[in-house]
Image (cartoon, rainbow, N blue to C red):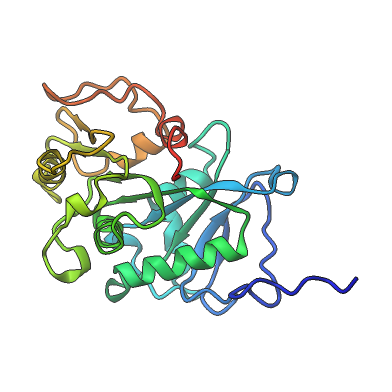
Amino acid sequence: PAPAPPPAGACTPAVVPNPGSLVLRAKGTTCASLGYAEFVPLAYASASTWPLIIYFHGDGQIGDGSASAIGVLTSSGLARQVQRDQWDPGRRFIVLSPQMELSEMNAATVKQFIDYAKVNFKVDPKRIYLTGSSRGGDPLFAYLSAENGGEAAAAVPISALSDNADDNGTLRECAYKDVPLWLFHGSADTVVSVSASATVQLNLGNCTPGAPVPPRFTEFTGAGHDVWTSVYDLSAMGDAVQPGRQPYDVSIYDWMLQYARP
């Protein structure tokens, strides 16, 4: 029989992952609208689908996705931890880290990238997880707000901006209250105030009806802006937290995998 045609939106030629290693895909080398860092598990070929984590970077990694710019993705955040092999001990996820310019940090760009990932990788559509650090909160919260949670099964914002969703300064927390959320912040963060995360938690708590899974908020005592490194590499587990905040007592990777969209 003739081979089945590729699904609509699939790259031609197809993206061929390099299992077990972080690969930088510059803009223009795939049919994605963005350049990105990519990781697929060593056993990628052995399963029909895999859970997906999409990581949104901070200001220090902003770029146009070109071959000359994309390398900065590995300077901080989850892409760096994956490159250093300091993250999920089970390597159980596809991880994609798109490089964005400020003008691209919006809901429409995120939706387009998720659609690209679903067509071109073995993504379990019920297990798509979003995480981001610092400025990466903008595209994360913009997407959740505009798409009523969209295709996110859970989300982990870390030291994340939360007041610029879709550049309109308005968050719609109750629109995504069905998405389990785990917020992390340092109590001594002078770059993005801890109030950014506290406000999201407070507003979600005021939704009627309430969130099916109450949001978790881990506020590390005395920590500054970069708490994402120790969250992603799990070394912050057990660190002191502010009174009334939830401890970091389970791997975020195990926590995410608890949740799947219906």
Q: What percent of the width, then of the height, locates residue 94? A: 56, 49
Q: Is residue 31 left or right of residue 154?
A: right
Left or right, 46 with respect to 116, comes to right
User: In terms of depth relative to the viewer, which is nearer, 38 or 48?
Assistant: 48
Foreground of the two, 204 or 20: 204
Residue 171 position within the rendered picture, expressed as x and y whole percent measured from the top left: 15, 58
In the rendered view, would you say 36 is above or below 183? below
- Quadrant of the drawing holding the N terminus: bottom right
The residue that appears at 55% across and 44% down in the rendered structure is 93
- Residue at 46% over, 41% down: 260
Examine the image and state in which quarter residue 208 appears. top left
In this rendered view, identify the residue nearer to me: 109 or 58.
109
41 vs 100: above or below: above
Residue extending farthest front: 209
Quarter of image, res 64: bottom left
Whether residue 245 is situated above or below residue 58 in the rendered picture: above
Q: Position of residue 163 (x, y in %)?
A: 13, 58
Q: Position of residue 71 (x, y in %)?
A: 48, 64
